[in-house]
Structure formats: structure tokens, C-alpha cells
Image: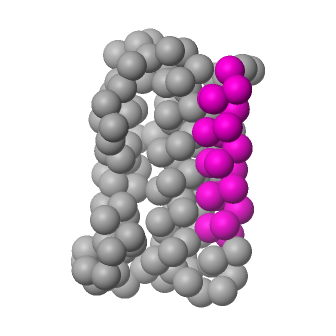
Amino acid sequence: MRDEAETWLNYAGENLESAKILLQSKLFNSCLQNVQQAIEKSLKAILIEKAIKFKKTHDILAIKYLLFDNEIEIKLSDEDCDFINSIYLPSKYPVGSALADYDPDETVCRDAIKLAEKTLVSVKAILK
């Protein structure tokens, strides 16, 4: 694996571990922000490893389809991607909660963490 791709994957792992710690502390917005970053960085690790050019973006759905266009299938549904995309701005900036329709809670965070774990496993399998 390229050093740069491995670095991105390591950062993704750190974001995932951070999300778990933040969940234990009941810091739900920050937990979700780290979940989003874990997924984004893991997907970008594939792009880097496969030398696929990409524009700067935080759009998980766009990254998923860029991978798909390059014959790499990630096990994230469009709905999963939309959910993760809905987290990005509100969890980073004080415009309300990370979720538009309701405040994040422990259940939402646990589900998001499972999604990030699944994504990391999938990415590692592709990069091996």
C-alpha cells in the first residue's frame, strides 16, 4: 500500500476510535463528526491507492460513485451516504445539531459507528 494511502487509512481509524470515546462521553455531535471523517478518509485512501484523481469534496455519495465508476464497489447504500452527508456541516459549525430533524442521541451515534466500522473493514479488504 502507498504510504499516503496508509496514512489516510490510519487517520480514518483514529477518527473512528475518537468517535467511540466521544460517544462514551455523550458528546454526540462530535461523535458524528468523527464518524463522517472516518468514512470520508477511508474512502479517499482507496482513491489515493488506486491513483484515481478526485476533487476536494466531503460528499460521501459523490466519492462512492467515483469509486463505482472506477469499478470499485463499496458496501454503503445511497441512504447511508445521505445520512453521513447530513452530518458534515452541522457537526462542524454551530448551526444546530448534526441532524436536521432531531438531536443526535446514543442510538444514532451507535448506528453511525457501525456504519464506519463496516466501511473500514470493506476498505481494508479492497486495499489488501
Tell me the quarter of the picture where residue 62 sits: top left
Q: Position of residue 104 (x, y in %)?
A: 43, 80
Q: Is residue 12 magenta?
A: yes
Quadrant holding the C terminus = top right
The residue at 36%/26% (across/down) is 54
Q: Is residue 43 magenta?
A: no
Q: In the depicted view, which residue is nearer to us: 49 or 114?
A: 49
34, above or below 10, in the image: below
- What residue is at 35 percent from the left and 47 percent from the top? 58
Q: Position of residue 43 (x, y in %)?
A: 51, 35
* Residue that protrudes farthest toward the front in the picture: 4
Please state the horizontal and vertical placement of residue 110, each as a whole percent of the image.
Answer: 59, 69
In terms of secondary structure, what is the magenta stretch mainly?
A: helix
Give, as a single range, the part of the protein colored magenta: 2-20
Image spot of residue 107 (x, y percent): 54, 76
Q: Is residue 111 in view from this perspective? A: no
Residue 46 vertical placement versus 13 (above, below): above
How are the colours assigned in the image?
Answer: one colour
Q: Against 29, is 120 above or below? A: above
The residue at the point 66 percent across, 86 percent down is 25
Q: Nearer the viewer, residue 48 or 46?
A: 48
Give the side of residue 8 with respect to residue 92, left or right.
Answer: right
Pick the quarter of the image with the N terminus. top right
**How many discs mark residues in the rendered view?**
0
Kindly indicate the quadrant of the structure image that contains residue 124: top right
Residue 96 appears in view:
yes
Residue at the image position 46 percent from the left and 40 percent from the top: 76
